[in-house]
Every structure is written in structure tokens, then in C-alpha cells.
Image: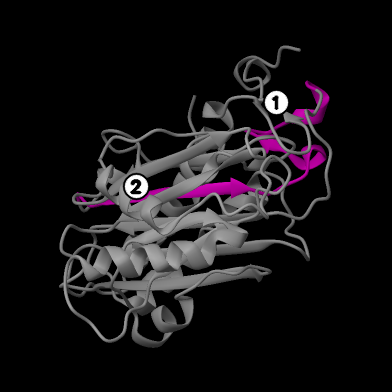
């Protein structure tokens, strides 16, 4: 099965970019209430605390509560790990990054970067299950091999009417560099889902019906030496993948891409290179969303049950 023209990296994960690691903490319990949520930490580099990296962000639709994007836009840098969690746990995640960084160095100001999606269908989002120490725990678990699907921040997410969550993919560039993507996929209506030219509603039934609004957080990483302006160009193109999957975007969606480069330097804006970077971003995000759907498991939660997406219709069109 091919999701584009470019070849995937060795693991086909965000962590194919050298030095990038990802860690999860998954929170699942039924007392005192139904909790299906978690935390995912993306660590751009081991010494991000001391050596900020070039970064940029792009927003397709801004119905979201992320933290830290304004300073990324202003300075073109990222100085902390990126934390993903649920909408109403953003403050706890912020405090977790502060406590984590306080163990590393002294500071008077800090720009934690937090992304969120709303998992309120499967998770009692008003219950404060996520605590600051979960951020530190996820950071300590960060590895270059990590789980996909209903894990970490993706535990309670729904995508195109099926169970969504964490997905990841990567693409190799002719230069020898790699571009990788990680998504927190919580968007889309079942009636719109299209994978490799096949429309889901023609083959399967949806597990859950809800409004079309929803969100996605996209993380892009590359070891190509891109500056902030160049990273923003690549980040904007990542949203094309959402349209390829059938999503038109909606009023109530928060669609955010955060991109960073692990290599300090400069590269010219050549047409050949940037055409390839744009394609790598689109292909890796497209496949990452598909991976979130393929890898997620059925979850019974706060307001109901969300089924894992069957995959036979994608593989052979079977019912």
C-alpha cells in the first residue's frame, strides 16, 4: 500500500529525524468517573533546553486553545518539548513543562508549547485527570520507537467517526535528509472520509455520529536546515493532506501545525527542494492520519462507544 511517491524513512515515524523522540502517558480508569485521556510529549532534541531550534507554526482554523504559538511566530524558535493533551488540561500541561524545565536549569521566563484536541465524547473532560507530573513521566518515557493509535493524548480522540488518536509517518528526501510528521487526529465527518480514492461510507458503517467539527494538531520535524520562514511554508502545505482525506475544514475546528528543524544552518529556496519538502509534508501527514485510524482500538467511554476503523475496505474494498 502506497501513500505517495516518496519513500518512507527507516521506521516511518517522526523519530526518523535524528534526535527526535516521543513519549506517552495513557490514563484509562472508570472511578471516580470515566477517564480516557493522556499526554504525549515530543522532544525535538536532548538539549532543547539549552539550544533552541528554528520553528514555525501555521493555523488553518483557529478554534483552539494551544499555548506558545505566539512566541514561536515572533522569534521563530522553540525552546521546550511540545506537549499534546486534551483541551481542558492545557494549563496542567503548561505547569508540567515549567516543573520539568526547572529540573534542568534556572529561568525567569519560559515558552511551553502545548497543543490540544477535545476528547469530551469518550473522556469526562471536566475531571482533572491530567496532572503536571504526567508531563514529566511522558518526557522520561520518550523514545525513538513509540506507540500509535489510542495512546497518550490520542486515548480519547475520534477521527472521521472512528477511533482516532496518534499517527506518524516520514519521508526521505533526495538530499539525504528526512521529514517526519506526528498527528493528534480528532477531526472529520464519516461521510467525508476518503482513503486512497475510496469513500468509507460506500463500504462500512460509522461507529459514531457527531458534528463535523473537530481538531488536529500536526507536528513536523526535519533535519534539513530550514529557518523559521521556510518552516512556515512547509507547515502551511501540511493542511492539504486533510482535504485529500475528505475534510473541508469546519467552523469549530482547531487545525494547527508546528514545524521545527533539528539542524542549524541555511538552505536556499530552490524549487526542486521545496517541491519535495511540500510533497513530503503532505504525504507524511496523510499517512500519519491513516495510521492513527489503522492503529487505534475500539474504546468505550464517557458518552458512548467508538469503534476502531475496519481496514479491509481500504485493502481490498470488502464489506
Q: Is residue 177 magenta?
A: yes
Disc 1: which residue: 307
Circle nearer the N terminus (1, 2) = 2
Q: Tell me the magenta residue range.
A: 176-204
Where, by quadrant of the figure, is residue 36 drawn? top right
- Residue drawn where x is 81% and y is 29% of the image: 201
- Residue drawn where x is 47% and y is 42% of the image: 152
Q: Is residue 182 magenta?
A: yes
Q: State which quarter of the image contains the C terminus.
A: top right
Q: Is label 2 in a helix, a strand or a loop?
A: helix
Q: Residue furthest front?
A: 32
**Can residue 243 be seen?**
yes
Location of residue 63 in the rendering, given as x and y in whole percent from the top left corner: 68, 69
Disc 2: which residue: 138
- Residue drawn where x is 34% and y is 77% of the image: 228
Q: Is residue 248 left or right of residue 76?
A: right
Q: How is the protein colored in the picture?
A: one colour
Say which of marks 1 and 2 sits in front: 2
Q: Is residue 101 left or right of residue 127?
A: left
In the displayed structure, 12 sits above or below 312; it is below
Closer to the camera, 269 or 167?
Answer: 167
Location of residue 87 in the rendering, given as x and y in whole percent from the top left corner: 61, 60
Judge the density around disc 1: few (<14), some (14-19), many (≥20) Cα neighbours within 10 Å: some
- How far, Cα to Cα, is label 1 from label 2? 26 Å
Amino acid at each position: 500500500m502506497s501513500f505517495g511517491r516518496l519513500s518512507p524513512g527507516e521506521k516511518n515515524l517522526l523519530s526518523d529525524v535524528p534526535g527526535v523522540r516521543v513519549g506517552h502517558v495513557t490514563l484509562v480508569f472508570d472511578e471516580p468517573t470515566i477517564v480516557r485521556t493522556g499526554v504525549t510529549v515530543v522532544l525535538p532534541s536532548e538539549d532543547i533546553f539549552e539550544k533552541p531550534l528554528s520553528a514555525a507554526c501555521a493555523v488553518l482554523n483557529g478554534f483552539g486553545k494551544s499555548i506558545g504559538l505566539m512566541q514561536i511566530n515572533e522569534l521563530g524558535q522553540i525552546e521546550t518539548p511540545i506537549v499534546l493533551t486534551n483541551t481542558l488540561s492545557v494549563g496542567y500541561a503548561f505547569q508540567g513543562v515549567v516543573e520539568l524545565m526547572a529540573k534542568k536549569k534556572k529561568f525567569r521566563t519560559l515558552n511551553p508549547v502545548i497543543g490540544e484536541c477535545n476528547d469530551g465524547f469518550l473522556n469526562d473532560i471536566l475531571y482533572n485527570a491530567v496532572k503536571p507530573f504526567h508531563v514529566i513521566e511522558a518526557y522520561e518515557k520518550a523514545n525513538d520507537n513509540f506507540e500509535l493509535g489510542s495512546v497518550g493524548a490520542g486515548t480519547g480522540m475520534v477521527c472521521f467517526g472512528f477511533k482516532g488518536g496518534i499517527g506518524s509517518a516520514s519521508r526521505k528526501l533526495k538530499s539525504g535528509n528526512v521529514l517526519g510528521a506526528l498527528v493528534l487526529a480528532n477531526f472529520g465527518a464519516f461521510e467525508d472520509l476518503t482513503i486512497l480514492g475510496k469513500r468509507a461510507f460506500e463500504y462500512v458503517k460509522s461507529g459514531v455520529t457527531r458534528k463535523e467539527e473537530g481538531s488536529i494538531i500536526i507536528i513536523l520535524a526535519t533535519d534539513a536546515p530550514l529557518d523559521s520562514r521556510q518552516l512556515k511554508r512547509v507547515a502551511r502545505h501540511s493542511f492539504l493532506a486533510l482535504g485529500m482525506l475528505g475534510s473541508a475544514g469546519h467552523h469549530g475546528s482547531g487545525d494547527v501545525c508546528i514545524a521545527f528543524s533539528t539542524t542549524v544552518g541555511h538552505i536556499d529556496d530552490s524549487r526542486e527542494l521545496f517541491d519535495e519538502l511540500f510533497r513530503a509534508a503532505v504525504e507524511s501527514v496523510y499517512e500519519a492520519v491513516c495510521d492513527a485510524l489503522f492503529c487505534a482500538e475500539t474504546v468505550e467511554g464517557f458518552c458512548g462507544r467508538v469503534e476502531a476503523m475496519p481496514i479491509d475496505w481500504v485493502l481490498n474494498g470488502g464489506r
